[in-house]
């Protein structure tokens, strides 16, 4: 009979220290992943993206344009807002890592979005970006879900008068439009950008990139 | 010169109809992925998990215990709460798909959690599960982030008096403890459960499983 006043016996032997879990995880990634082509600014971003994916084979799909990591870090340090296409992205960003209490904005659930989407004949994810315009100058864009959002951002940035973000993380995921939208961003490079080429991507990888750019702390 | 009153020209040719994007995506997955070993209850869950991952090679890692899909669907249909280990999971669940306006609960940000974690010498993700106890009977558990949460759930369920959930989706991701915690769930099977074996997993895959179990609508 167990003592009813004692805490339940731990039946499983596992690491319970959060900092140790991160340190061991990043050490495994650095031992296993092909990271040589990333510079010192990019490497911690790639490591954290791989961590979120649980997959060292993500490494060859990650692409940073020249100067991307520096541009994004400077923007965040200067208080830039972070514009997110999905609530899973905006909710995943670790607020205490942000260097300047940066605003984290997701307009997808704005009440005007369904009508805008209908009027634009596009998805709600794309229509929500029209509400980014007042925040777009100098922002860090984090698109981790919808290819239509990334395509619509590129369409907006083809307008001469559309404000320019400081950097774009373009990591929509999936089977229809994801690879194509990221290829289009990589070809256009309207501002410094990062992508995960192909079908892979998603909110967790996108959040990881933001969290890595926000702070050098591992 | 473009007409300043005309809408911006769309420069990119892409599918803008959300329902068509889903239909095309699921058709690609069903053409490419090895789904034969899933029954009719499981197959739409596996398809949506693959969709969230952007990776047909996820299929061989997905495991459903006998009766899992039916148990989870019945629980959701009966109004079971959905208990989530992370805000990215709780925020990702599509509320309009839920059959009974099911409560979606994430206790991670409860103000008591940091002190509980310190007292337990475990992570905040594990400590937050102590607050699940009043909701656990008959619930659907969705763990998509923290191996320590899944290990602590198994520890709680080893107590004879701990209430039993109806089903567990155990899909933590990563390099330290993720594979081990899912192996432990699969070995113990305290209730019907689903896992993604190995390092892969995460909030998006977990959310996709919940969304598929919540509604047959594709």
Image: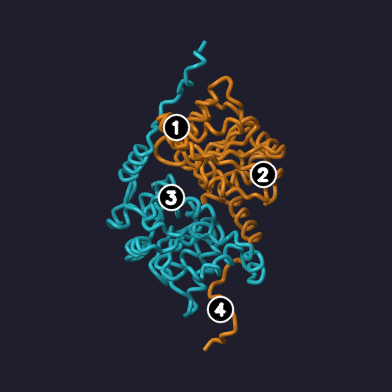
Chain colours: A orange, B cyan
Q: Residue at x 43, y 35 (%)?
A: A123
- Pointer 1 residue: A180
Q: Are marks 3 and 4 on the same chain?
A: no
Q: How packed is label 1: few (under 14 Cα within 10 Å), some, or many (20 or more)?
A: many
Residue A118 image offset from top left, x and y in percent: 41, 32
CA–CA distance between discs 3 and 2?
29 Å
**1 vs 4, front mark:** 4
Q: How packed is label 2: few (under 14 Cα within 10 Å), some, or many (20 or more)?
A: many
Q: Is residue B202 above or below residue A63?
A: below
Residue A109 has which mark? none
CA–CA distance between discs 3 and 1?
26 Å
- Pointer 3 residue: B94
**3 vs 1, front mark:** 3
Q: Residue at x 69, y 45 (%)?
A: A101
**3 vs 2, front mark:** 3
Output the chain of dot 2: A
CA–CA distance between discs 2 and 1?
28 Å
Q: Are marks 2 and 1 on the same chain?
A: yes
- Pointer 2 residue: A214
CA–CA distance between discs 3 and 4?
35 Å
Would residue B22 be found to the left or right of residue A49 on screen?
Answer: left
Output the chain of dot 1: A
Out of A18 and B179, give the one closest to the viewer.
A18
**2 vs 1, front mark:** 2
Out of A142 and A192, give the one closest to the viewer.
A142
Q: How packed is label 4: few (under 14 Cα within 10 Å), some, or many (20 or more)?
A: few
Q: Residue at x 47, y 58 (%)?
A: B104
Residue B54 image offset from top left, x and y in percent: 43, 44
Mark closer to the chain start, 2 or 1? 1
Residue A8 has which mark? 4
């Amino acid at each position: 009979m167990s003592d009813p006043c004692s805490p339940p016996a731990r039946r499983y032997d596992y690491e319970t220290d959060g900092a140790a879990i991160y340190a061991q995880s990043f050490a495994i990634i650095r031992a296993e992943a092909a990271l040589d082509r990333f510079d010192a600014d990019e490497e911690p971003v790639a490591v954290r993206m791989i961590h979120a994916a649980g997959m060292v084979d993500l490494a060859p799909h990650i692409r940073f344009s020249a100067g991307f990591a520096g541009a994004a870090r400077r923007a965040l340090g200067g208080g830039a807002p972070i514009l997110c296409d999905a609530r899973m992205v905006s909710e995943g960003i670790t607020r205490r890592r942000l260097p300047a209490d940066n605003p984290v904005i997701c307009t997808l659930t704005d009440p005007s979005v369904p009508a805008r989407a209908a009027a634009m004949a596009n998805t709600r994810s794309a229509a929500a970006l029209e509400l980014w315009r007042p925040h777009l100058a100098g922002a860090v864009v984090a698109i981790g879900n919808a290819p239509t959002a990334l395509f619509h951002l590129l369409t907006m940035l083809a307008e001469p008068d559309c404000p320019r973000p400081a950097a774009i993380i373009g990591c929509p995921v999936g089977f229809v439009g994801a690879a194509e939208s990221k290829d289009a961003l990589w070809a256009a490079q309207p501002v410094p950008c990062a992508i995960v080429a192909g079908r892979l991507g998603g909110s967790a990888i996108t959040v990881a990139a933001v969290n890595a750019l926000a702070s050098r702390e591992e």
